[in-house]
Amino acid sequence: MAGTRLFLVSGKGGTGKSAVSAALALRAQRQGDRVLAMEIGEEGSLASHFATTPLAFEPREVRPGLHAMKVSRPDALLEYLSLQLRLPGVGRFGGRIARAFDALATAAPAVREIITIGKVYWEVRSGRWDTVVVDAPPTGQIGSYLRAPQSIKELVPTGRIRGQAESMAGTLSDPEITRLVLVTVPEEVPTAETEETLAWLDREKVVPPPRVVVNRVLPVLEVATRPTGVAGEMVDLHQSLVAEQQIWLDRLPGDVQLPYLFGVYTPAEVAANLSDGMEAVL
């Protein structure tokens, strides 16, 4: 493979972005890629979709060829200072540095996001992986992360930090490297939030045009003759729900549609089932 591919997966909370992230990583792993799955945020459920113990900052192999980790901002900061800014011995002062960093980030919020997205950038550029999949913050927050390199460029006129911000921005905007995946469901509020995010991305152009994955799409029933009784009522209900979801599907790009999974599944089973539909995204 010529270089590492980066998939940033976002979506409104509750649409299944962690499941889609895990499914993407599993599909890439089945194709023979060396894969890193990264989780950003406090409420992620990536570990459960891999049926493994809670993730840590150090990547851990959860399947042959598939590693997973959770981005901790304090750990990412210490790594950034020691590896990218080449400040030796910062680990001895980790607690004080983290507190000072929080104070700085209050005045310049983009600093928080640049440290986090910088860890993603570092792994993409490390050469260790063919594919990096990021279970990214939800659509209500993703804009600040994607725009963080540009914000830092506007704040810092010159020097190493500005140079790294320019390189990060170039990586995020490169269609040969980065793909943003927006996960939604065919319902009113998630559809409206997805449309707002698409409009913002079209204005800002911080990443290439995203792919939209519509999750939990009900199949159309092919019924020659409506049954009677309760079975007929169930058919009527299903068809009314399909008609309702079609209203929202017509408003979405719908690059990929994933089926509604009927039955009782563990998070790991959900990810495994959805991974079959990830080829079009990859």
Image (cartoon, rainbow, N blue to C red):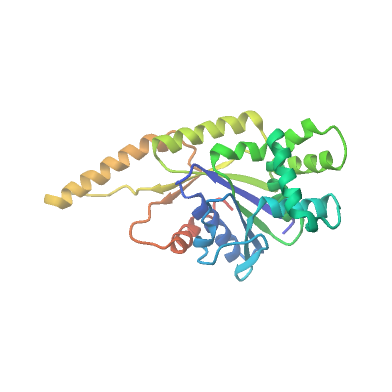
- For the N terminus, give its image quadrant: bottom right
Please state if 160 lies on the left or on the right of 136 as rendered.
right
Please state if 62 lies on the left or on the right of 169 as rendered.
left
Coordinates of residue 217 in the picture (x, y in percent): 39, 47
Outermost residue, front direction?
96
Depth check: give the residue in front, 106 or 109.
106
Outermost residue, right direction?
159
Depth check: give the residue in front, 76 or 6.
76
Outermost residue, bottom direction?
64
Please state if 223 lies on the left or on the right of 160 as rendered.
left
Q: Residue at x 52, y 53 (%)?
A: 18
Q: Residue at x 76, y 49 (%)?
A: 97
Coordinates of residue 116 in the picture (x, y in percent): 68, 47
Coordinates of residue 62 in the picture (x, y in percent): 59, 68
Q: Residue at x 14, y 51 (%)?
A: 230
Outermost residue, top direction?
203
Asked if residue 207 shows in the view, the reply is no
In the rendered view, would you say 187 is above or below 233?
above
Depth check: give the residue in front, 62 or 1.
62
Residue 162: quarter of image: top right
Q: Residue at x 65, y 40 (%)?
A: 145
